[in-house]
Image: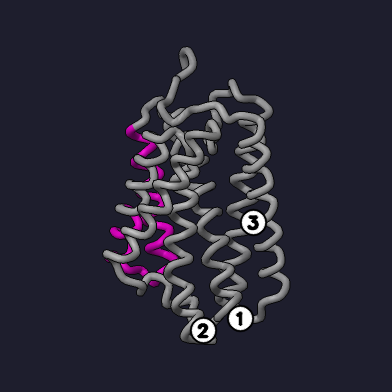
Amino acid sequence: MSGRFESIFEREDTGIMQRIEIATVFIVVVGLLWLSVTITEFVLWRSAVILLLMAIFASIFWVVDLVAPKNIYTESIGFGKPMNALIGAILGFGFACLFFFIGNINSFSLIVPFAVAGAIFALLASFVEEMVFRSILTPTSARLFQNDWMGAIIGIVAFGLFHFTVYGASWELMIVAMIFGTVLLIGNTVIESTSFGYVAHFFYNFFVVFPLLLVIM
């Protein structure tokens, strides 16, 4: 590989934003550990363990990039500068509202029988998926192939295939996930902060599980 490829997905985080990212990852991992040792439903337990392994795997890539940022094999992106992160969070919340209210709530029907534990799982899943697919996989693929388009395509397709597997081989849900992921990736890139994707994904999941919890409880 000659020279160092400068991807459009690369950006520098400030100290405070890195600390927030580390705290967020820690909370998510602890939450998944709690789910994996307390829940009794096999389907949810298996899903929690898979997400936990994904979070640990992504964290290893993240740490490698933080320790050796000039390496040519890994790349991770984060919240960026505080103002970018704030703008991304506000716009991400707005997009979550829009996407939820023009769509439907069938995507998360699988978590209904698991009530509160299922809701917590859905919220934690949003962070893990953003960390794996848009904070790690997309920029790392762009660096490895030295092509931003290739990195974007790999991240979007992988996100879609993940949901195809999780939601019972549904092509419809896979396409919806790919559209959702594409918008999040564009938002993250334009705003230069992954806060857009994290907040949008979290609140979309929240809007889905909250009314279901009201019905159950």
Residue 162 in magenta?
Answer: yes
Nearer the N terminus, badge 2 or badge 3?
A: 3
Q: Using a 10 Å C-alpha cutoff, classify the residue at mark 1 as few (fewer than 14 neighbours), some (14 to 19) or many (20 or more).
A: few
**Residue 107 at x, y percent in the picture:** 38, 70
Q: CA distance from mark 2 to mark 1?
A: 10 Å
Q: Secondary structure at mark 1?
A: loop
Quadrant for the C terminus in the image: bottom right
**Is 140 displayed left or right of 97 in the figure?**
right
Nearest the viewer among 217 and 83 is 83
**188 vs 163, nearest the viewer:** 188
Magenta-highlighted residues: 149-178
Above or below for 39 versus 99 = below
Cα distance between the residues tagged 2 and 3: 22 Å
Please report whichever mark, 2 or 1, sits nearer to the chain's N-terminal start.
Answer: 1
- Residue at the farthest top position: 3
**Residue visible at 37% across and 50% down in the picture:** 181
Mark 3 Cα-neighbour bin, 10 Å: few <14, some 14–19, many ≥20: many
Residue 41, which numbered label? 1
Query: Which mark is drawn over residue 113?
Result: 2
Residue occupying image coordinates x 72% and y 71% = 37
Q: Considering only order in the chain, which callout, 3 or 1, is on the residue closer to the N terminus?
A: 3
Query: Which amino acid type corresponds to the residue marked 1 in the rendered image?
Result: Glu
Q: Is residue 69 magenta?
A: no
- Disc 2 vs disc 1: which is toward the camera? 2
Tag 3 residue: 28
